[in-house]
Image: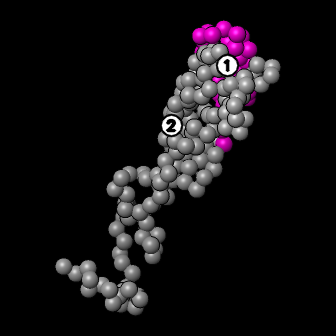
Amino acid sequence: MATRLLVSDLLTRLGATRRERLGVPIEVSLTQASIAGEAMLDVQLAGIGDGILVRGTASVTVRYACNRCLTEWDENLEVGIDQVYRVEPEDIDTEMVVDATGWIDVGATVHDEIILALQPVPLCAPDCRGLCPECGTDLNTEPCAGHGDASSSPFAALEHLFDS
């Protein structure tokens, strides 16, 4: 799948616009979020004199794992795209470039915007109770029966501090 768009026709026409829709392949594998497939990009391209303005949205399905109970779910994510590609960038390391033949590559922009929009600490619900630290029971679905005498814990001497 192509992530490159030919924009040479817009470079010479200040204010000229064109709409583009395309699939952008994306693969992300983080501890609690993963994406495998393609993001759907819907953008307006505009000639701005010294380059191209790309503005629109990218949408993709993200597979999250809850930070507390490890439940997995899919969630649709839509992010805004607002990027300028320059013919002669001032800083080649930070600015996006229109190459010498009039092409831009939107893949890196889409990838970066999606990564930045992912939930840093995904939760299946705001009141998720998580897993029992001793037996691993999902406390959202069933109660934990307890785990014997806590007096052998090195923190047992502090228990009286929580009695009210």
Coloring applied to the structure: one colour
Nearer to the camera, 21 or 90? 90
Vertical side of 35 occupied by 138: above or below: below
Q: Which mark is residue 77?
A: 2
Residue at the location (58% across, 43% down)? 115
Question: Which quadrant is the N terminus positioned in?
Answer: top right
Q: Which residues are magenta?
A: 1-27
Residue 107 visible, this angle: no
Amino acid type of the residue tagged 2 in the rendering: Leu
Nearer to the camera, 103 or 4? 103
| 103 is within the stretch colored magenta | no
Q: Secondary structure at mark 2?
A: strand
Residue at the location (40% across, 91% down)? 152
Position of residue 93 measured from the top left corner of the image (x, y, whole percent) = 71, 39
Residue 87 quadrant: top right
Nearer to the camera, 152 or 107? 107
The mark closer to the camera, 1 or 2, is 1
Position of residue 22 measured from the top left corner of the image (x, y, whole percent) = 64, 24
> Residue placed farthest to the front in the image?
90
Residue indicated by mark 1: 50
Tell how many labels: 2
| 23 is within the stretch colored magenta | yes
Residue at the location (68% across, 12% down)? 10
Residue at the location (80% across, 22% down)? 100
Position of residue 105 measured from the top left corner of the image (x, y, whole percent) = 71, 28
Q: Residues within 10 Å of mark 1 (few under 14, many from 20)?
A: some
Please tell me which of labels 1 and 2 falls first in the chain.
1
Vertical side of 30 occupied by 84: above or below: above
Position of residue 50 measured from the top left corner of the image (x, y, whole percent) = 67, 19
